[in-house]
Amino acid sequence: MTPGTTLRALGALSIGAIASMTAGALLKSHPPGGNQGWARTNYAGNVVTLLEGPVFVVGAVAGATGVGTARGGSGGGAGEG
């Protein structure tokens, strides 16, 4: 792995992590449709949230877009750069 590739990977990781943390904070403070639509009780009787799915997607897309942008592409999709 070349130094440039490593830096692009770290940049994409940072972008994805920041986007994921921001989305998580926003969604947990103001869940769309209220908490009842996103809360479930698991097998152990604990209340869990389903917000991690959308938070993961936001981070993954932001990280993938960051890779395309760092490579000189527009970050628009697969096969670019």
Image: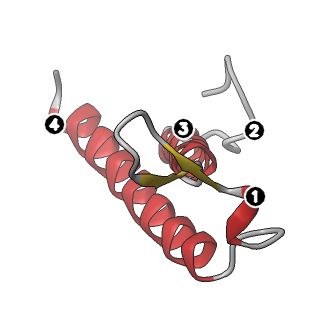
User: What is the distance, in whole Å, between disc 4 and disc 1 at their CAs?
Assistant: 45 Å
Instruction: Residue 57 in the image: state x and y as whole percent.
Output: 60, 42
Q: Can you tell which mark lies on residue 25?
A: none
Q: Which residue is mark 2?
A: 76
Q: Which residue is mark 4?
A: 3
Q: Secondary structure at mark 3?
A: helix
User: What is the distance, in whole Å, between disc 2 and disc 1 at their CAs?
Assistant: 32 Å
Q: Which residue is mark 3?
A: 64
Q: Residues within 10 Å of mark 4 (few under 14, many from 20)?
A: few
Mark 2 is on which residue type?
Gly
Q: Which residue is mark 1?
A: 37
Residue 43 lies, with reference to residue 69, above or below; the image says above
Mark 3 is on which residue type?
Ala
Pointers 4 and 3 in contact (CB under 8 A)? no
In this picture, residue 14 sits left or right of residue 49: left
- State the residue at coordinates (34%, 47%): 13
Q: Quadrant of residue 1?
A: top left
**Labels 4 and 3: the sequence-earlier one:** 4
User: Between residues 74 and 46, which one lies in front from this camera angle?
Assistant: 46
- State the residue at coordinates (46%, 40%): 42
Q: Secondary structure at mark 4?
A: helix
**Labels 2 and 1: the sequence-earlier one:** 1
Furthest toward the front, the residue is: 45
Instruction: Residue 27 in the image: state x and y as whole percent.
Output: 62, 70
Residue 8 lies, with reference to residue 26, above or below; the image says above
Mark 1 is on which residue type?
Gly
**Labels 4 and 1: the sequence-earlier one:** 4
Pointers 3 and 2 in contact (CB under 8 A)? no
User: What is the distance, in whole Å, between disc 3 and disc 1 at their CAs?
Assistant: 29 Å
Mark 3 or mark 2, whichever is nearer to me: 3
Instruction: Residue 2 in the image: state x and y as whole percent.
Output: 17, 27
